[in-house]
Amino acid sequence: MHGLANPARFLRLARWLLPVTLVPGLVLSLGALAWGLALAPPDHLMGVTVKILFIHVPCVWLGMAGWSTIAMASLAELVWRHPLAGVAARAAAVPGAVFTALGLITGSIWGRPTWGTWWVWDGRLTSFLILLFLYFGYIALADAAQRDAAGGGSAGRIPAIFGLVGAINIPIINRSVVWWNSLHQPASLTLGKSAIDGTYLWPLLIAALGFSLIFGAVVLARMRMLLAQVQTEARLRRKALG
Amino acid sequence: MHERLDQWHFVWAAVGIGVIGTLAMVGWSLFAMIRAERRRDAVRRK
């Protein structure tokens, strides 16, 4: 990990890795969606709305994976002072928030024909909405910390602490359908076990892989953007000073 | 009287919003990255 602490070395790797993750990600996710829409049969209870699974589930997984990335990068920033960890955490926030919002919207669209309502204030939906608000808070804090750091301040660690504290919500989302009564079904897919038939499972796993690669590509693009902004700021400050 | 819902409308809406939202995020991130790197290179050349 510390081999990547050098921004120049990281940028060389990121330039190569960005198209390698983005292009297969787009092909796999769009291909899996087309497969699911065209070939997956209607479910005997949910009818054709079961096909929303192929977009909703990857979005929800990546919404939670985004905050897990922020928490792990924040830990690396606070404990090991890894110079790129804070950049990685900030870069994961926007794609995490977008996938969380898409998970909420697609879930709401799925809820209307299957539950008869767009929204209920149950444990799963509410804890997932809180995740979106946590992302908004993190993005605002990280922007403020960056401006503070540019002015010579020392607020850089506050977003990392917020990222770690906010991770408490991830197990709550995961266990919410077990702890509280919910319209939302319990987990159909856990490590090593699946209650989903193969006709739905394979396009779902391929869509999840494709969207995960897109998530990785967006994080890399945003890390390059943030590093370029830091380098520009530093260069302009040096010029202004002398 | 019962409201009859065409389930396909919900499927297309969810998939459309998911795909357009994802592609918009990818496009925006790439555009922001290219713009930031061009600005850095322009400042270096000055």
Image (cartoon, rainbow, N blue to C red):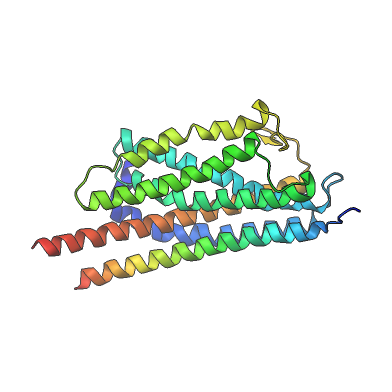
In the drawing, does residue B29 fall left or right of residue A188? left
**Residue at (35%, 44%) from the top-left corner?**
A85
Image quadrant for the C terminus of chain A?
Answer: bottom left
Foreground of the two, A169 or A211: A169
Task: State which quarter of the image contains the N terminus of chain A.
Answer: top left
Percent across and percent down for residue A130 are 53, 40
- Residue A10 % position (x, y): 34, 53
Residue closest to the eye, A102 or A216? A102
Instruction: Tell me which residue sits at (60%, 53%) in the image.
Output: A102
Nearer the observer, A202 or A105 = A105
Q: Is residue A58 above or below residue A187?
A: below
Horizontally, residue A50 falls left or right of residue A174, namely: right
Q: Residue furthest top?
A: A179
**Residue at position x 52%, y 41% in the image:** A131
Q: Residue furthest left?
A: A242
Residue A38 % position (x, y): 78, 60
A61 above or below A211? above
Q: Residue at x 41, y 35 (%)?
A: A164
Tell me if I can see residue A88 in this picture. Answer: no
Q: Position of residue A90 (x, y in %)?
A: 39, 49
| Quarter of image, res A32 | bottom right
Q: Is residue A79 left or right of residue A213?
A: left
* Residue B22, picture quadrant: bottom right
Q: Is residue A26 visible?
A: yes
